[in-house]
Image (cartoon, grey):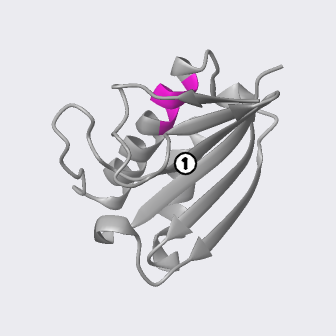
Amino acid sequence: MKKIINTTNAPAPIGPYSQAVQAGNFLFISGQIAINPENGELNLTNIEEETHQVMRNLKAVLLEAGLTFENVVKSSIFLSDMGTFAQVNEVYGQYFKSDFPARETVQVSVLPKNVNVEISVIAITG
């Protein structure tokens, strides 16, 4: 059985998908990009602020499901330029305290809306 999770505190999906789906004890959060949910505009000031916006969007979805970053067990980071890895990694690390999730980071040729970073996560509810 699955439960769809949506919140107005994160950007609405820009396609036929849900912000998150809870299946059993797992929450699968769709890839988030730096759309500001308050005005629907991209926040591309710099790679650090772009990454913070992505992480704030992920946090909003986690909170809607009653979870925090401590529940995240897996993340996937997609970058348009691996040269930004250090900056993205620095910001990403600010949202996790210990017992870090498993993760991969890959460079891709193009991301939705030509952003520089997209992150998806899997969390556990129990």
Does residue 7 appear to the left or right of 29 in the view shown? left
Task: Name the spot of residue 44 as percent of width and height, x first.
Answer: 24, 57
Magenta part of the chain: 58-62
Q: Quadrant of the N terminus?
A: top right
Is most of the magenta stretch helix, strand or loop?
helix
Q: Quadrant of the C terminus?
A: top right
Q: Quadrant of residue 65?
A: top right
Q: Does 27 lie within the magenta span?
A: no
Closer-to-camera residue (102/95): 102
Could you tell me if residue 115 is visible in this image? no
Residue occupied by mark 1: 30
Does residue 84 appear to the left or right of 96 in the view shown? left
Q: Quadrant of residue 100?
A: top right
Task: Name the spot of residue 108 as percent of width and height, x first.
Answer: 52, 79
Does 115 sit above or below residue 23? below
Q: Does 61 lie within the magenta span?
A: yes
**In the orientation shown, which residue stands out farthest toward the bottom?**
109
How many labels were placed on the picture? 1
Task: Name the spot of residue 53 as percent of width and height, x first.
Answer: 36, 43
Q: Amino acid at mark 1?
A: Ser
At 39% from the left edge and 53% from the top edge, which residue is drawn?
33
Does 113 sit above or below residue 27? below
Closer-to-camera residue (50/125): 125
Q: Callout 1: few (<14), some (14-19), or many (20+) C-alpha neighbours within 10 Å?
A: some
Does residue 80 appear to the left or right of 104 in the view shown? left
At 55% from the left edge and 78% from the top edge, which residue is drawn?
107
Closer-to-camera residue (8/16): 16
